[in-house]
Image: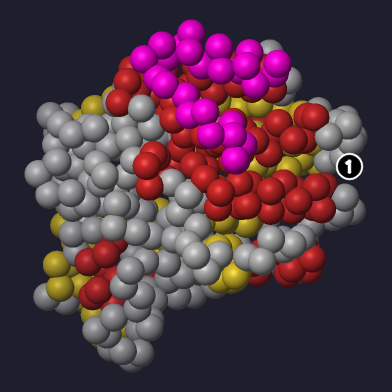
Amino acid sequence: MKRILFGCVIYLLFPNLVLSQNAVVSAGLKQTVLVLSSDSLEGRLTGSIGETKAANYLVNQLQHIGVRPIENQFTFPFSYTYKSNPHDTSSVSSIDIIGWNVVGFIDNRREQTIVIGAHYDHLGRNEHHNSTDINSFGEIHNGADDNASGVAAVLEVARELVENDITESSNFIFAFFSGEEDGLVGSKAFLEDSVFQSLKISCMLNLDMVGRLDSLYKLHVGGFGTSPVFPLTLSTNNLFNLKLEIDSSGVGPSDHTSFYLKNIPVLFFFTGTHDDYHKASDDIEKVNFEGLEIVTNYVYSIALSLSSENSIPFTATRTVLKSKARGKISLGIMPNYTSSNNGLQVDGVSKGKPAEKGGILAGDIIIKINDCEISDVYAYMDCLSRLNTGDKLKVTVIRNGKKLKCKVQL
């Protein structure tokens, strides 16, 4: 009866959708991906009508599951200015955007709170030019894997935690971030909100693109080194024959990075890149739902295990950018992962590293390293791959609308 009623709710919200009758895997996973990656949401661009529809759907599902609001609200607005050309200091290329984070709470009246999160925004019709498809402006980018899959998994973890008849030793926040595709904006806003600053967050579990588990069951887990508790937790709960690809760094191209930079232990779950990444072809037909259910069950098991820990100490790790091209050296910056094609914005600078010593500051936009043009994060990594320790560099940056040159030695 519960499944039938749930289907009726979906139909009332989205009458043009036809639900699959295949019940081999969790109906909730399929229904969530189906709704969020439908053309009617037009790619869920932050600030769009599609984002609002997606947020309303998530609120409805949290209420249906039995997850409570925090301080009587599920939605938390944030604002930012998107610049289509960061080199333009005028207001002509600037757009003021209001996005919405959706947040639910299981209050077990404990001191510590575990955050389980996923971003629900995507590229819309490529209005912000983040697509890897050439000439795809106007095409709907449904983002079934990126990141309807992660959202679906978080909702199912929430459902299990509500229905398991256990009062865990931690509270749980279920956070659905918007603005991720424009530079982790929503997760940064979440951490700056006084409502959430009052919570003692013990760790953050982030699910981003978990819908393409391959035949080898390879699952990338980032943040392995951000707490000494994590290695044993990951291994003892892996009852699903997953082949874990471990990365100790707490920094990566998704929302867990915002938490790591606040000294919060993080785990990042990701089934890998593919040819449909940031393309209009990232559709529901290519999601491996059996694999998605395995990842969901694994994360649920980890969440239960972590909730029983007396403490989850934080450990600082190296700052490494995971990308298609990975350099052997580093400037020591925290890049903004948004691909704007107008340079690489620096979100943070590590103390004592070459960038800091050379005078590069957070907020700078790197446009050139020596004669190497930096259009985005991938061009940056490709440029670094050609350099060696000891090289002396001239790094050209845009700072407050002015072009400056910094001398950096690797």
Q: Which residue is mark 1?
A: 169
Figure quadrant of residue 312: bottom right
Which residue is at the front of the view, 151 or 351? Answer: 151
* Image: 191 above or below 78: below
Identify the magenta region: 1-27
Residue 8 percent coordinates (x, y): 55, 12
Residue 365 falls left or right of residue 55: left
Residue drawn at (80%, 47%), measured in percent from left and top? 304
Which residue is at the front of the view, 244 or 229? Answer: 244
Which residue is at the front of the view, 106 or 227? Answer: 106
Q: Amino acid at mark 1?
A: Ser
Q: Residues within 10 Å of mark 1 (few under 14, many from 20)?
A: some
Query: Where does the C terminus fall, quadrant-wise?
Result: bottom left
* 248 within the magenta span: no
Residue 299 falls left or right of residue 121: right
**Which residue lies most toward the top here?**
12
**Residue 84, visible in the rendered structure:** yes
Residue 264 percent coordinates (x, y): 66, 53
* Image: 320 above or below 185: below
Helix, strand or loop for disc 1:
loop
